[in-house]
Image: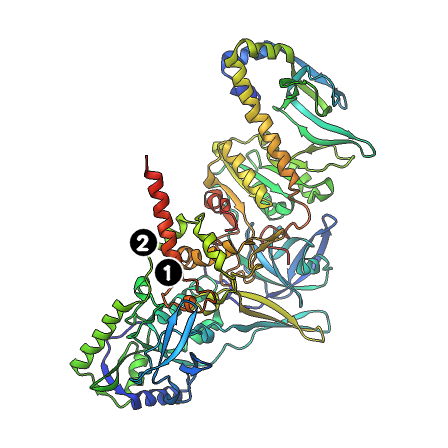
Amino acid sequence: MTGAPPAAAPPVRYRVTARTAETADTASIVLEPVTDALPPFAPGQFAMVYAFGVGDIPLSVSGIDGHRLTHTVRAVGAVSRALHGMRPGETVGVRGPFGTAWRLPDTPGADVLVVAGGIGLAPLRPLVERTLAAHRRTGGPAVLVGARTPADLFFAADVERWRTAGARVLTTVDRPDPQWYGEVGVVTTLLDRAAVDPPRTTAYLCGPEVMIRAAARAVVHRGVAPDRIHVSLERTMHCGTGHCGHCQLGPLLLCRDGPVVTWSQAEQLLSVREL
Amino acid sequence: MTSAPAATAVIDRAGLDALIRVLAAHGRTVVGPTVRDGAIVLAELASGEELPYGWGVELEAGHYRLRPRPDGAAFAHSAGPNSWKTFLHPQRERQWSADRASDGGTAFRTDPPPTVSYAFLGVRPCDLRAIAMQDRVLTGGPHADGRYRSRRSRAFLVAVECTEPGATCFCVSMGTGPAAGPGYDLALTELVDEDGHRFLVRAGSPEGEQVLAELRLRPADPDTRDEAARVVREAADRMGRTMPPVDLRALMRDTLDAERWDDVTARCLTCGNCTMVCPTCFCTTAEDVTDLTGDHAERWRRWESCFDLEFTHLPTGPVRSSPRSRYRQWLTHKIGTWHDRFGSSGCVGCGRCIVWCPVGIDITEEAHALNQERRTVADRQEMP
Amino acid sequence: MTALLAGLAADHRDRLLALGRDVAWADGARIFEEGGPADRFWLVRSGLVALDVHVPGRGTLVVETLGEGELLGWSWLFEPYRWQLGAVARGVVDAIEFDAAAVRAAMDDEPAFGLELLRLIGAGTIGPRLHAARTRLLDLYGGGQDTAGTGPAR
């Protein structure tokens, strides 16, 4: 890889130019380079985003627009809380791009199936955008989204736009509120209504690991080949450059060999407890 | 660094002192073995006097004692508690710092690359290979660790072949010794016999040749050459430990669910000593610190052990919460999945993890036990 | 065609369909009530059906929705033949309705048909719904969920 930043290189300064509250604890922040930009990010890759004095965390890109990056962050730890609380004008440090990208289908016109659980939709958003742009003539992707409650669903405006652009978006929640009139249940129950042709389908899954395992098995059961199922995995990451050892999953370093891997790579590894 | 066709020569103890002086005169920080706190450690040497002449070691699982040697040999001891990674990949190092400006912006700054030029004197063949493995890990991927590379590319390596393997050594099983493999600038073989205390020396690089040229040498006589080859060859037969003669990578892959892991973790304290003394373990953690003004922050990297409970965790908690999984992670990575990521085993057979384990867990014994369990399971499955 | 019908051998499918008739519900129509007699069941052809349960003080809570191609109701298979949940149409729903007693009689009459139907309902409906319920017990998206799909909470 040429132009890859060296390990231990300091972050590059980016300025927060917009912030959107997605749910009660999740926000998207739009970042633009203060001066120099990092090399271009691809959907599925991640950045290490640094909040001054607090630390950095791996965040997938949830939007790519030239040098403008969007990250969708849920406030759960010290760094993510700091980033979640960022307001336009504030500066963060960004390192990257790191890791593998979602691999678009090899064959044009292949059916694209996207299955997202919770905040797993964030890294899939730029993939859906690319797919819609690339497959205008065909049917558009099937996007299945599961969330805990209706209030935890986000990217509502994007989802509407995707539908208009030809995507079949199905949404389900675990716990409906009285106003919810949509589907209730786990995201895998939507698979039978995805209207994809399994032998021609490439699938992209992201969400909690248990959901990924269940969804991947269900997708395989319907006839999608394991090497055409792409999943994004998570583990601790400190360096992003393949040196700190934290993100090891068996033979893989997920910051380098992942986070996106195929189900044929992941299935056996995820079946070993505490690997 | 490739080994050049080497002129061999012989130096005596005074020659070794001169070598240290020459290396120091080249502006190098000379590091080598010396006796400190009841152990032979690697430390900066001011002169050849500080080498552990006349000291050997007695090693066993969880056991290390210095023993005087009547022959006065300087390098007739096995690996000590530290290794060269202490110098090339230090325990704690600043990565960069950040300052918050009055306008709210942030400026990031890296430290200038390290300028130290080390000369490592007394690099064991196993440790020579360990350095090569860390080279691969830290500079062989798409993102090279520039600070490591600065130190490493300026380091001058004087290997010393092994003539006195310890009871916990198994470099022969790992294919790393007792003869020095490639990568050295100079290689020594120590001989103490009726012909005197002397060192066969050969250069492995142009720089090594250059240093040799500055020493008073006598050409190596055939007898000394033969004798040096003989003692190294015979050392290969005196390894205190062996690994099972099987594909260890496959063994690790096949035994992830073995019962033996429960046995070893009944003893393991998950203290992480093995990872600290291991010459190839490279894992680190990121530490962010801020000064009292709150306007200056620094990123430090420090050694971390995969035995730490929080080493890898998900939002829901630690991934490897059982000691069993953490010991398994260490061993399967060391001699198994290291191959997948770095093209070789990560174990050089130095035996440090055996010696410095407070409860005497022996990596070779565990590998043998796993191999035995795999065989037993296979036999059971073959029975009608 | 629903997975259930597609999975049946042709003669068994014909036998089942001979016992069915088309029905439709308007939006909001209650299809059955919790505790009521499970004397029918349906294959949803289009639309969405909400399974619900009434909790005093919290109202009627939807626990799951069933869509196109899914089997609505399996309490009719086992005694005491009572609905465990209620069902209400979400929007216009088209379905094929079967008389439970007639289907049970056909299953008894031809055990091969009965076994195949039971297996399909077990594999396609009861098992997946049990699995889904267990998965939801884990509340996977709750509490300490990750920051964005690649790393831990920090």
Q: Tell me the quarter of the picture where residue A68 sits.
A: bottom right
Image quadrant occupied by the N terminus of chain B: bottom left
Image quadrant occupied by the C terminus of chain B: top left
Tag 2's secondary structure?
A: loop
In the depicted view, which residue is nearer to us: A87 or B268?
B268
Could you tell me how far apart the alpha carbons at marks 2 and 1 are, in whole angstroms? 12 Å
Depth check, mark 2 against mark 1: the one in front is: 1
Q: Residue at x 21, y 74 (%)?
A: B230
Q: In the rendered structure, which amino acid carries the disc numbered 1?
A: Thr
Residue on which disc 1 sits: B364
As drawn, B2 above or below A2:
below
Query: Could you tell me residue B209's position as x and y percent?
Result: 28, 82
Q: How many marks?
A: 2
Task: Report the disc number at residue B246.
Answer: 2
Residue B199 is left or right of residue A246, and the answer is left
As drawn, A231 above or below C26:
below
Name the residue furthest right.
Answer: C57
In the depicted view, which residue is nearer to us: B294 or C114?
C114
Query: Could you tell me residue B228's position as x and y percent?
Result: 22, 77
Q: Residue at x 18, y 77 (%)?
A: B226
Residue A169 in sight from this viewpoint: no
Query: Could you tell me residue A34's position as x and y percent?
Result: 65, 65
In the depicted view, which residue is nearer to us: A241 or B328?
B328
Give the letter of the chain under mark 1.
B
Q: Residue at x 29, y 76 (%)?
A: B204
Residue C36 in sight from this viewpoint: yes
N-terminal-most mark, 2 or 1: 2
Q: In the rendered structure, which amino acid carries the disc numbered 2?
A: Val
